[in-house]
Amino acid sequence: MIPQFKKAKLILFEPTKFFSKLKEKSLVSAFTYFILLVCIYNVMVLIIQPLTFWLFFDVLYPAFGIEGVVPEIDGLIMVLISVLGISMTIAMSFLVALLLHLWIKLFGGKKKYAETYEIMAYSTTPNYLIGWIPIVGFLTFIYQIYLLILATHQVHKIKYKTTVLMYVIPLSLLFVLYVIGLYFFFTSMV
């Protein structure tokens, strides 16, 4: 278990060093690491979610005069949902890596699927380690994209500028669509 935490520390604080040595790693190692991250994330969400519900529904809403329905979620149901979430996340990781691999190949990626799975799994470190903290999740997403750019550049040998553009342009378009969707959602409520 300790080597996994050393690996996380290296990914978070010395990513260039970590990803430059990625060729020495294996798909099994990345998969095991990813499972550990997903489990940590889900346990932390199970702990923090009741506190978040309490903060919003019992403290903030009444303080602003908002009457809301407090969702009652049984602890066992939350655990079952978490187990299902872990299973789906792990299964979907292979599909996400495949789509990522095809995207990278489109831009001249040089490595095989196994290396793409590794960079996908390792780049999720910030999100799964501390992304469960409310508000911090957005910042971890940004750092995760940075790690994905760095890893793609180093492992697949794609020019850095190309790598940045191949991620930033689609994410920017998705963001614009998200903002447009929010606009229509909130204006339809008026």
Image (cartoon, rainbow, N blue to C red):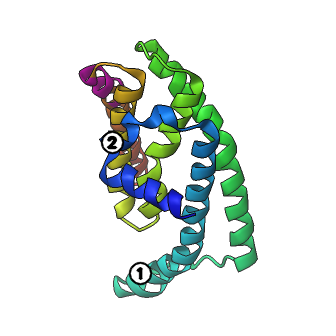
Q: Is residue 61 left or right of residue 121?
A: left
| View extreme (front): residue | 24
* Viewer can see residue 178: no
* Viewer can see residue 113: yes
Q: Is residue 51 above or below residue 112?
A: below
Q: Is residue 17 above or below residue 139?
A: above
* Front of the two marks 2 and 1: 2
Q: Is residue 139 left or right of residue 52?
A: left
Q: Which residue is mark 2?
A: 17
Nearer to the camera, 101 or 180? 101
Q: Is residue 47 above or below residue 135?
A: below
Residue 123 image point, x, y percent: 44, 44
Give the quadrant of residue 145. Answer: top left
Amino acid carrying label 1: it is Tyr
Q: Which mark is residue 108?
A: none
Rounded to the nearest whole Å, what is the CA distance between mark 2 and mark 1? 47 Å
Q: Residue at x 47, y 48 (%)?
A: 124
| Label 2 vs 1, first from the N-terminus | 2
Q: Which residue is mark 1?
A: 61
Residue interval drawn in magenta: 160-167
Residue 48 image point, x, y percent: 51, 75
Q: Is residue 89 left or right of residue 109?
A: right
Assess whether residue 178 is covered by the magenta stretch: no
**Quarter the N terminus occupies:** bottom right
Asked if the residues shown at circle 2 and circle 1 are in contact, with their CB atoms under 8 angstroms apart, the answer is no
Q: How many marks?
A: 2
**Quarter the C terminus occupies:** bottom left
Q: Is residue 37 above or below residue 178?
A: below
Assess whether residue 166 is covered by the magenta stretch: yes
Residue 151 image point, x, y percent: 38, 34
Residue 104 image point, x, y percent: 45, 21
Looking at the rendered structure, the secondary structure element under dot 2 is: helix
